[in-house]
Image (cartoon, rainbow, N blue to C red):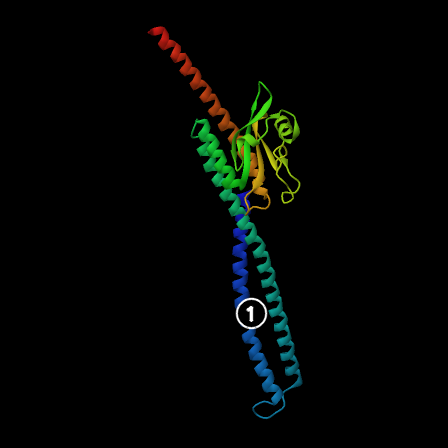
Amino acid sequence: MQKDDERLVHSRGEEFLQVFKKGAEFTQDLLRENERLRFRLLELENGQPSGEAAPAAELTKLSERIADLEREKQEILDRIKQVEEENQDFAARYIEIEDENNNLANLYIASYQLHSTLDFKEVLQIITEIIINLIGAEEFAILLLDEKSDELQAVSTEGVDRSEIPVVRLGKGIIGGVAQSGESHFAADCDAYERDFNAPMVCIPLKIKEHVIGVLAIYKLLMQKTEFAAVDYELFTLLAGHAATAIFSSRLYNDSERKLSTIQGFIDLLTK
């Protein structure tokens, strides 16, 4: 879809350049012809070089021709103006597509980084950097679900102290509801939002297929970001899946490492 839009923008840009070039050349021709006819009309009105009066029919014909040329020139100018307006719209769309492509490319790189390590702390740090740089969040928390107690606890925060984020029961409040339903929550008005740790501005479920392992709760955006663009919602969706997979994999790895270390300890005791 994006490639089709890019091809369309490029095609319309080429069309604009061709129309503009032809329009400019044609307008110059019209102006030269108009000037020539006006000069000829002036000669006829003032009398021919021989001093004879100009035929009325020729004067009328020249006047009509000049009027036709003026109309053609105005039509060309109107067409050029229309194409310029269309080109501005497509240029704006092109910039939007470029921004979206850049964000998706950045997310691809960030996703690669996410899956390049199995260290739990490194994974959380990478997710934090992605949320700051790509989403534009200033204050947020990552909460993971403890399936034994059905509670969500903050494991990483930015801009706020982790102790400030309350422990949330599954299904309770906005955070618990998002974790239970797997559906994202967005505040109706970001500008009017006031920080509430129990009711974040944005709450995104971190899930692998339909299995929710935690949530991302955003409480404040960076100053230069006043609202979410369409691409942000795509980033949220992609980030939630990649982040959940990376977190789940790193936790499994860490758990297995601890178990292996414990087993190795028993083996060492038995073999001594």
Residue 151 versus residue 88 in the image, above or below: above
Q: Position of residue 201 (x, y in %)?
A: 61, 38
Q: Quadrant of residue 217?
A: top right
Is residue 208 visible in the rendered image? The answer is no
Q: So how many labels did they put on this image?
A: 1
| Between 82 and 207, the one nearer to me in the picture | 207
Residue 143 versus residue 109 in the image, above or below: above
Residue 91 versus residue 28 in the image, above or below: above
Q: Position of residue 1 (x, y in %)?
A: 56, 42
User: Does residue 124 appear left or right of residue 46 in this picture?
Assistant: left
Q: Say which residue appears at 62% left-offset and 87% top-offset.
A: 45
Q: Say which residue appears at 62% left-offset and 76% top-offset.
A: 66
- Quick one: SS at disc 1? helix
Q: Position of residue 243 (x, y in %)?
A: 51, 31
| Between 82 and 19, the one nearer to me in the picture | 82
Residue under label 1, please give it. 27
Q: Say which residue appears at 53% left-offset and 50% top-offset.
A: 95
